[in-house]
Amino acid sequence: WQPFTYMWLHGGPLHLLFNMLFLWMAGPPLEMVWGSQRFLKFYLQCGIGAGLVILGWNGLLSIWDPWMRAVPTLGASGAIYGIVTGFCLLWPDRTIILLFPPMPIRAIWLVPLLFFLDFLFGGVGNVSYIGHLGGVLVAAGLMRRELRSAINWRSLRYRWHRMRMRNRLRAVRRDEWERRRNDDVRH
């Protein structure tokens, strides 16, 4: 039962707070699109799948080093990362404003940013990076069609084209602003 029950316990109030914040942020749009039953099924599959990935990883580590002890894992972070991945795959171009630091980011970059922040600020407590990765992998496996549409050659080429056009537009606006400013200084 541990691959199921581990996700209902948490390491502390801060761990629970951040998990609930991300569930509150990414969960309601998914539930509105999928319905409550499919959303709950997806949440549980991501959480249980992350628990099984953790078990598999601990098994591999014990084969490599028989004296290594497996660290117990708590929290719904694998399921939460799965929900966030589902949100990001369904709405990759949605803009999200982060709390810390307060900056806008496209949804498709949220999961890689979270992994980077995990790595940057890691080592605090017993953070299960494998559990996070397990939730993302299970969600990506369950949403293969959405993953292919979000990350394929045509969409990447389209995004590259859009970025280049935005940069050109910014350059034109900057030149126009400079020209107006120089005209105002002369008069």
Image (tube, rainbow, N blue to C red):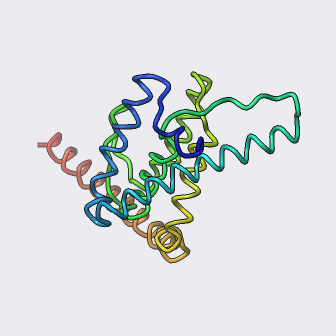
- Determine the residue positioned at 44% across, 67% down: 159
Q: How many marks?
A: 0
Q: Position of residue 19 (x, y in %)?
A: 41, 37
Give the camera-side residue of 143 and 115.
143
Q: Position of residue 156 (x, y in %)?
A: 51, 69
Q: Residue furthest front?
A: 1
Q: Position of residue 93 (x, y in %)?
A: 36, 61
Q: Is residue 46 left or right of residue 182?
A: right
Question: Looking at the rendering, in which quadrant would you find the N terminus?
Answer: top right
**From what the image shows, is residue 131 above or below residue 71?**
below
Give the camera-side residue of 82 and 46.
46
Q: Position of residue 129 (x, y in %)?
A: 61, 38
- Determine the residue positioned at 45% across, 22% down: 12
Q: Residue furthest left?
A: 187
**From what the image shows, is residue 124 above or below residue 16?**
above
**From what the image shows, is residue 163 above or below residue 27?**
below
Q: Is residue 177 left or right of residue 156?
A: left
Give the camera-side residue of 185 and 134.
134
Please identify the quarter of the rendering in which residue 104 is found.
Answer: top left
- Determine the residue positioned at 37% across, 64% down: 38
Q: Residue furthest bottom?
A: 154
Question: Looking at the rendering, in which quadrant would you find the C terminus?
Answer: top left
Q: Is residue 54 left or right of residue 38?
A: right
Give the camera-side residue of 59 and 77.
59
